[in-house]
Amino acid sequence: MTRTSGTQALERAIALLEAIANAPEDGVKLADVAEACAIEQPTAHRIATRLESSGLVARVGDSKRFCLGPRLFQLAMASAEGGGLLGKARPSLLRLAVMSGDCVFLMVRSGLDAVCLDRQDGDYTIRSLTGRIGGATPLGLGTGSVTILSYLPAEERLEILAGNRTRIEASGHPLPTEEEMAAIRACGHSYEVSTTIAGVVGVAVPILTPKGRPLGALALGATEARLPADRLDVIVAMMEKERREIEQSVSASRVLLEPR
Amino acid sequence: MTRTSGTQALERAIALLEAIANAPEDGVKLADVAEACAIEQPTAHRIATRLESSGLVARVGDSKRFCLGPRLFQLAMASAEGGGLLGKARPSLLRLAVMSGDCVFLMVRSGLDAVCLDRQDGDYTIRSLTGRIGGATPLGLGTGSVTILSYLPAEERLEILAGNRTRIEASGHPLPTEEEMAAIRACGHSYEVSTTIAGVVGVAVPILTPKGRPLGALALGATEARLPADRLDVIVAMMEKERREIEQSVSASRVLLEPR
DNA sequence: TTGAATATATCCATAATATGGAATATTGAG
DNA sequence: CTCAATATTCCATATTATGGATATATTCAA
């Protein structure tokens, strides 16, 4: 008599995890978690304690309150250590940071967000640059983020923008238009003058699979003064070179070869 | 006819996650995940696709293979703030790194492991020092790790050492004895000369809750030459001062919490 | 290309599993 | 200390996950 797809328990566990992730710094009470997820307390308790025993969730200090657990840290770093995108992109990030002196980011898509997977600071890094490793922005807001969005299939772009409209508008920025995104695809990179932090500019190039699906983006942040038109060309050229490097390295792993 | 405690589905999902985390660099096939977890393929598929839709797991490139997903990075960041420990310890780490010039770590327990939550390098940091952020060592191996272990309840220590025996012995190190751990508790810090990297020494102090449970440890790594007996005293004093700072900050924050 | 072999995805009857109301224990505020 | 709020445990019930069988997709060799 049910209509769910057969993963109710898991769905609830994930909801719990998200609820705990959104909790204030010093944790949430079980009762609040249960309410937030709209599940009964005994059920929430069963799930939460199991998550706790796996380390995905932990108690805050001596209290009963829940917070995210350190196991998440290990898992995230394990995915980094494997020869995934992060490992393959790191040399490029380092080179770009050293050569440009600016701040370089590796962004990937995660649901409706773009997440910062890695960051390397050059000598002239602006302290105020936000993107920390693990940080996220809605797809469509920010240079790297818009770049990834631009290379997604058209219908997915629409869905994503619909889902992110309120968040993006709340930030005071306009939604990227189809024309803007087509322009990004046409020239192979995006360039953006930040309206939130005066004098800051961003450049980004996509990282694509052989099939053309966006794996992520390389983004670079600098002050406007450090990026006059002629230097911009040089920077973009460097980024495109590294982008090709990464794409080759990624597709070189046999597994990624094109089906069909 | 089973005897599990009512979380089979969740347990399997977690097993899947771990299996995928342990996978080689370019992901695992569904069939292998299923086998590793000893569950049937349809079940593995159902769980895996649900994990995928939440971003905890992703496909490698264009292939069908699974790897850990970017959502973990976001959660890991949030978990770092779990209990506020990282935020509260960072100023201390910075001070210690600047004042000592050495390499300072914040370690916390995660199951049978101690995980590096944060690291700050001083001017004299030894490149070869291993602990990356997110890196883990078995509880009982390494200065910070042994320190955390020493302050855990006696029976937990035994369980943990039993569970870690093979891993620790495989590293060529002896298991820490009860006497050694009692000594650490008695003097409030541990000191260890590395046998793996010649000339490297480590010092660590615990971070305890008001109830005496270990939240984690501050650890410092330096060359033997940089830590003669008299300087060691100074360093330990500095670390203990910062430790108290953190403990106060942590226990203070909880008082401010208002129930809804 | 083609077709065999292998892997992934879907279906659905069945029974094992998660569920949540009620009872009990613990915590924390006054 | 007392009481109310919260966490934890218990267990009969039926909702939910399960996995054998099957369909579809992908890979590989020739």
Image (cartoon, coloured by chain):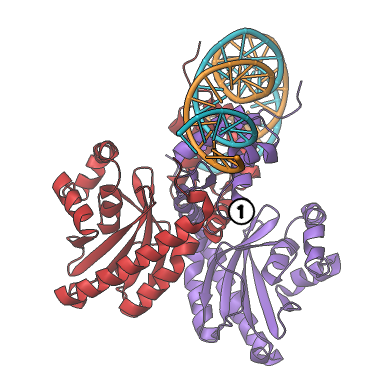
Chain colours: A red, B purple, C cyan, D orange
Report which quarter residue B188 is drawn in. Answer: bottom right
Residue B53, relative to residue A255: is it above or below?
Answer: above
Q: Amino acid at mark 1?
A: Pro
Residue B217 pos. (x, y %): 63, 67
Chain bearing mark 1? B
State how many labels appear: 1
Residue D9, relative to residue A244: is it above or below?
Answer: above
Residue that appears at 80% across and 70% down: B173
Left or right of residue B45: residue A250: left
Residue B90 pos. (x, y %): 48, 69
Left or right of residue B78: residue A195: left
Judging depth in this view, the residue of C24 and B53 nearest the camera is B53
- Does the rendering let one see residue A172? no
Read off the residue under disc 1.
Answer: B24
| Quadrant into which the C terminus of chain B falls | top left
Residue that appears at 80% across and 56% down: B154
Residue A217, relative to residue A22: is it above or below?
Answer: below
Residue that appears at 53% across and 23% down: A6
Report which quarter residue B202 is drawn in. Answer: bottom right
Judging depth in this view, the residue of B240 and B155 nearest the camera is B155
Dot 1 falls on a residue whose secondary structure is: loop
| Quadrant into which the N terminus of chain B falls | top right
